[in-house]
Structure formats: structure tokens, C-alpha cells
Image (tube, coloured by chain):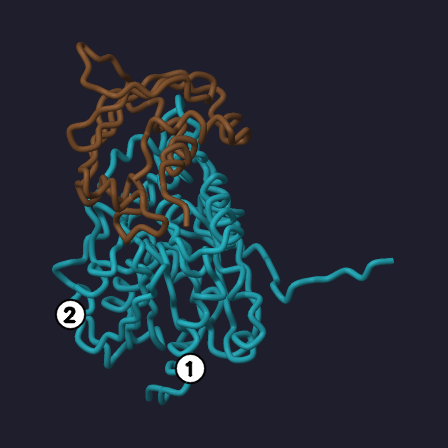
Amino acid sequence: MTEAIFEPVIGRYLRLDLLGEPHRLYIEEAGQGIPLLCLHTAGSDSRQYRALLNDAELLKEYRVIAFDLPWHGKTSPPPGWQNREYKLTSQAYTDIIMTVCEALGLDQPVVMGCSIGGRIVLHLALEHASHFRAIIGLQSGAHVEPYYDLQWLHRPDVQGGETCAGIVSGLVGPAAPDDGRWETLWHYMQGGPGIFKGDLHFYTVDGDIRDRVAEINTELCPVYLLSGDYDYSCTADDTRALGRLIKGTEITIMPGVGHFPMSEDPDGFLQYLWPVLEKIRHAEARP
Amino acid sequence: MQDPQRLPERVNGDGWLVHRGRFVDTTFLLEVGDQGYLIRILDGRVESVRPGPFVMARWSFAIRVQEEAWAEYCQPYPKPGYHDILAMVKFKTLKLEGDQHPLMANLLYFKDVLVKLRETI
């Protein structure tokens, strides 16, 4: 008989009210130590962090947690979803993250987000700095202008999943191995109708934080930004511009990498992430 | 850059790519600098590539790209910003025009068709 091989990852459903509505929020976690809360990109889900959730060295020092936003992955939309348009806002996104942190009783977690996640961590650093040990923004910029017609992401006469994957396929960097590239695209192919587009409402309209990022105090909440140079949604220059605005930010530019570092090329990404996590771990705890 | 007229042999020899485009029936314009090519696709196969000039050309959608940008796109390992047609849309070196429904409904297919024009190492 073949022995069952289980990963260290535990997936569970958390019952809680989010934005005044009952939800079954899907959460995965592994490891012990400093909580590291990971936020997925627009139109995808927590599977993007599968490699971090399996990295033995990381799990010795960090409790890695990733959840699917409502309407994403295994977190279903709230009842009545069929009669409304999904649109993510800064306020809703912030409320969801803070509610999850409270429900899990996370003490001074590090929060790391990519793309829309890389944007919302800037909002968190502004509004909830004292709650977080540090923020890590992947593919993080203060604003992105839409550069294609977003209507294509949600219309019944094109297959949404394949078109969403087609839209983001070039955002995967050329250094990514094929399995990482195509698993990343598979997640996009599985997104619900209109969800990627609804997330981009936050990314391109509501979440514009250009005129406020300079107020982020990195002494209260250290900020680390890592960006791949093949990302044309949030470019390396966007991240550098953000770094100039936020005093004390540390920036890493990752050559050959695209918009989904943790998912498209997990092994490569961990080489860049590990020194940042070590720095955070060895930093003196705040009083 | 690879001559677009080599597309039929490059695409039609890739059975899986042809399968993925099996519902595509359209003619599109690829315009590199001033040089246009009318590319006819039927059931995922490239039926013909006709270089311009044209008189009263008909097409569903057009991809108009700057010559230098296209030369970079066709490199085996293009620089950032030249590695994908949507990247070039963002940086305004490539324009998509016309009825883009056939393109957007089969975007992964068309991207892989165009990648066939990339030089291999």
C-alpha cells in the first residue's frame, strides 16, 4: 500500500461576518512563529502562496497564512450575489483583512500582498500601522491607469476564464518555469465571472493612494517592496517611484520576474524574500 | 525578425495550437511600420498571409506596431515591455483596432500565433 503524503498545509473554513454578511472564509496555514499573512492578486486565490506554505525553512520561523477573499477560490460570495455587481473597494478590502486578523487573534503579523494586495498593504501601513510588524508589497504601486478595455474581462460572448488568463499571460516573467507559469494562469481561468474586473475597480479607480503614500511612517511600520522587472501592470519604475515617496522603504527589483513572483517562480522568489524575512525577524520588537 | 509569410508553416505544423484555434475564422491585419500583412485564419490554420499594399482591404481587427518595437518583440528574449502585445499596448508601441472580439475571445491562441514569429535561440 502506498503511504499517503500530506503537505504541512491545513485548509479550514472560518465562519465570520464580513461587511455585515455571513461568510465561510477559506484559509490555509502552515508553520509556527511570526504570523505572515499573505494576500493574493486580483482575480486569483490563495493557491498563489502554495510554495511558501510548503517551504520547510520558512515554516520554522513563520506561521504562513493565506485566505481566499470573498468571491474568490473556495470562499463563496455572500447570499444574494446573483443580483449584484462585485466591486472591491479600499474600505471593504481593509475591513476584511482587519476582521480576519482579529478573528485569528494575530499578534503583530507581517502582511504581504501582491498587486491589489501590494496596494492594500500601503493602505494598512497608513491606517493601521501599529497592528503590523512590517508590510511587504509585491508588485506594489500607488496607482495604475487602465491600459486595456476592462469590459473584455466580463461579457457573456467571451469565455471569461480564458480571456482573463490571456490578459495576464504576458505578466508572467520569462524566467518563470512552465509549471509555475501555467498554474498561475489556471487560477485565473478558474475565477468567477466578473471577479477579476471587480477587483480591478479597487486597483484602477478606488484604491488610488498617490497623494497619501508619503505619509507612511516606516519607523512605525517598516515597508519592503519587491518587484519583478517584466511586470507591465505595476512596473519596476512604479515601485521605484513609490520608494522615493515613502522614506525608509527598502526595494528589491527581481530581474526576469513578472507580476506573480510567489506563484510564477516560487523558488526564485524565495531567494529574494528570505533576506527580507530574516531582517524582519531580527528587528527589535517594538515596545 | 521572422517574415510573417512564414506563419503558415510555423502555425499549421503545431497541431495543438491549431486545435486551440479551431473556432477562429477571421482575417486580421498585422502592420509593422508601413508594411501590412493580411492574415487569413480558418479553423485555427493560417490559410494565407498577403503582404500589402492593398486596395480596399477588409479585416476584423488590426495590430499596428512600430517597426523597432516589433524587432525587439521578435528577439528570443525580448526586453521588458516588448515581450507581449498587451505590454506594447500599455507602452503605446502597438495599437489594437477594429472589431477585437475574435482576438479577445481567443487571446491565448493569437498570442501564441504571434510568438511563432519570434526568433529562436
- The disc placed on residue A32 is none
- Please determine whether, in this image, residue A20 is positioned above or below residue A278: above
Q: Secondary structure at mark 2?
A: helix
A14 sits left or right of A283 in the view: right
Question: Which residue is labeled 2 in the image?
Answer: A244
- Kind of residue sitting beneath label 2: Arg
Please tell me in which quadrant of the rendered image residue A205 appears: top left
Residue reaching furthest to the right = A1
A163 sits left or right of A148 in the view: right
Camera-side residue: A71 or B55?
B55
**Residue at point 51%, 29% (across, down):** B13
Chain that appears brown: B
The chain holding disc 1 is A
- Kind of residue sitting beneath label 1: Glu
Determine the colour of chain A: cyan
Residue reaching furthest to the top = B56
**Residue at point 44%, 72% (across, down):** A271
Q: Secondary structure at mark 1?
A: helix
* Classed neighbour count for the residue bearing mark 2: other residues with Cα under 10 Å, few (<14), some (14–19), many (≥20): few
Contact check, label 2 and label 1, Cβ < 8 Å: no
Question: Which residue is labeled 1 in the image?
Answer: A278
Please tell me in which quadrant of the rendered image residue A71 appears: top left
Instruction: Point out residue A244 in the picture as x, y percentages from the top left corner.
Output: 15, 70
Please tell me in which quadrant of the rendered image residue B5 appears: top left
Camera-side residue: A105 or B108?
B108
**Residue at point 34%, 54% (across, down):** A93
Of callouts 2 and 1, the N-terminal one: 2
